Amino acid sequence: MTSPRTRITRIGDGMYRVEHEDQNELVYAAGPPDNRWVFWKGRVFQIAGNGAGDSGPDKVRPASGARPATESLTAPMPARVSRILVQPGAAIKKGATAIVLEAMKMELPVRALADAIVVAVHCREGEMVQADAVLIELK
């Protein structure tokens, strides 16, 4: 019996293909080594080093902590708004794509982390947005 193997291939600046057990997924990374932001399956994670000079991360956590009364969907990296799939007042289900960004010739779907109501949309299709820009507010 052999153990499953994971293969990671760098396919561009900040873009990686992860192959594991017959699955291929794209993972995007940005930021300095001691404070890396990773975009995977519509979610953003922060990998913060402990500053002690070791190569391993001190902690990996979702970029957003405990769910506040109003939650913001933000841009994981500089990108162009390709499609906005929600409007204020609309209900959105956990995991549903709210907005699609385009960066480095790849589409980046940004998904709701929980069932919510769209409070506001703070961008327009075709607009360039910076990393951490608030795109959509949910409640």
Image: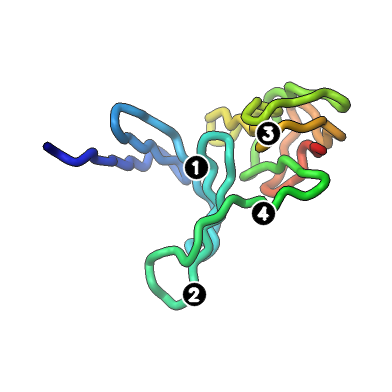
Question: Gap in Å between the C-alphas at discs 4 and 3?
Answer: 14 Å
Question: Gap in Å between the C-alphas at discs 2 and 4?
Answer: 21 Å
Q: Earlier in the sequence, mark 1 or mark 2?
A: 1
Nearer to us of marks 1 and 3 is 3
- Report x, y in % for residue 57: 44, 63
Q: Earlier in the sequence, mark 2 or mark 4?
A: 2
Q: Name the residue that disc number 2 marks.
A: 51
Q: Name the residue that disc number 3 marks.
A: 112
* Residue in the picture at 51% in, 39% down: 40
Nearer to us of marks 1 and 4 is 4
Q: Name the residue that disc number 4 marks.
A: 65
- Report x, y in % for residue 22: 30, 27
Question: Gap in Å between the C-alphas at discs 3 and 2?
Answer: 32 Å
Q: Secondary structure at mark 1?
A: strand
Circle 2 crowding by C-alpha within 10 Å: few under 14, some 14–19, many from 20: few
Q: Earlier in the sequence, mark 3 or mark 2?
A: 2
Are discs 4 and 3 less than 8 Å apart at CB?
Answer: no
- Report x, y in % for residue 139: 82, 38
